[in-house]
Structure formats: structure tokens, C-alpha cells
Image: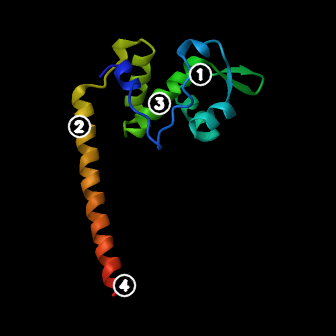
Amino acid sequence: MDANTFEQGVATPAFHTGPAVADGAREGALFSIGDLAREFGITLRALRFYEDKGLLSPRRDGMTRLYSEADRRRLTVILKGKHLGFTLAEIRALVAAHDGEEASLTLTRDRCLSQLAQLERQRTEIDAAIAELKNMATSLAA
């Protein structure tokens, strides 16, 4: 899975990629921390966390963080990786691949399949817990 394939995934209500805008339309635009937080539905603290981890690197104008369109695209990749359950190290590799640092890409097809298997196991466990709770609720209502 390359960065382009990863980036073309489908957004879900739990994962918002912001308004659809042609790639070149925002090139050169700057965004405040509040702009990105609102657009992506995340907290200011989350953005600062990704900055602290070296995943985003906004410019500074005094105390104000100014995010570029490239930072915005990186944030899309970061949030998709988070949504899919990848670790911070794996997300870092995805961001590096997205930025054209192919040598940094350590995420493999096997790791994607492993993550998929883990999510399927979790879904099975959740389905079993839901069924058990429904049975309990039914027996308590009787």
C-alpha cells in the first residue's frame, strides 16, 4: 500500500477530511490551529500533540502556529492512520511516504493484513458483548 493508495480511502463520519477543494486551490494558503481543528473535528491539543511528535511542523508568527497546505495534507494521512488503528510509528512512516520519502515506508502489506485481522477479532468480540448485553437487558425486563 503506497501513500497515494492510502490517501484515496473513503471518509466516514468518524473520519473527516475537510471540504473538498482542488489540490492547487489552497496551495500557498495558511491555516491557524483553530481552522484545522474545526475543519477536521479535532482538538487543539491533538494538533499540538502531532506537532510535538514531529508529524506536523507549522510555521510560527510569534505565538501563532501557521499550517501550510502540506501540513493539512499530512494531517489527513495522520487521521486516517489513527482511524485505521495504526501505531504512531506506522503513521510516521505513512506521512514520510506521503511526503515522498519512500525509503522510510516500513508499513507493509503484511502489516495491513495483520491490522485488518486484529480489527476483525475486535469486531467479533464486540458483537459477542453486544449479544450478551441484549440478552441481559431482555432477561432484566422480564
Q: Pinpoint residue 91: horizontal percent, then vertical percent.
A: 41, 29
Question: What is the secondary structure assignment of the residue under circle 4?
Answer: helix
Which of label 2 and label 4 is nearer to you? Answer: 4
In the visual, does 4 lie left or right of 49?
Answer: left
Question: What is the secondary structure assignment of the residue under circle 2?
Answer: helix
Question: Hey, which residue is sitting farthest bottom in the picture?
Answer: 142
Q: Look at mark 2 in the image and give the residue it sits on.
A: 114
Q: In this view, does 138 lie above or below 13?
A: below
**Is label 2 in contact with label 3 (beta carbons under 8 Å)?**
no
Q: In this view, does 14 lie above or below 63?
A: below
How busy is the neighbourhood of tag 4: few (under 14 within 10 Å), some, or many (20 plus)?
A: few
Mark 4 or mark 3: whose residue is earlier in sequence = 3
The mark found on residue 141 in the picture is 4
Q: Look at mark 3 in the image and give the residue it sits on.
A: 78
Task: Name the kind of residue labelled 1 in the image.
Answer: Ser
Task: Name the kind of residue labelled 3 in the image.
Answer: Ile
Question: Which residue shows up at 23% across the image and 34% down it?
Answer: 113
Mark 2 or mark 3: whose residue is earlier in sequence = 3
How busy is the neighbourhood of tag 2: few (under 14 within 10 Å), some, or many (20 plus)?
A: few
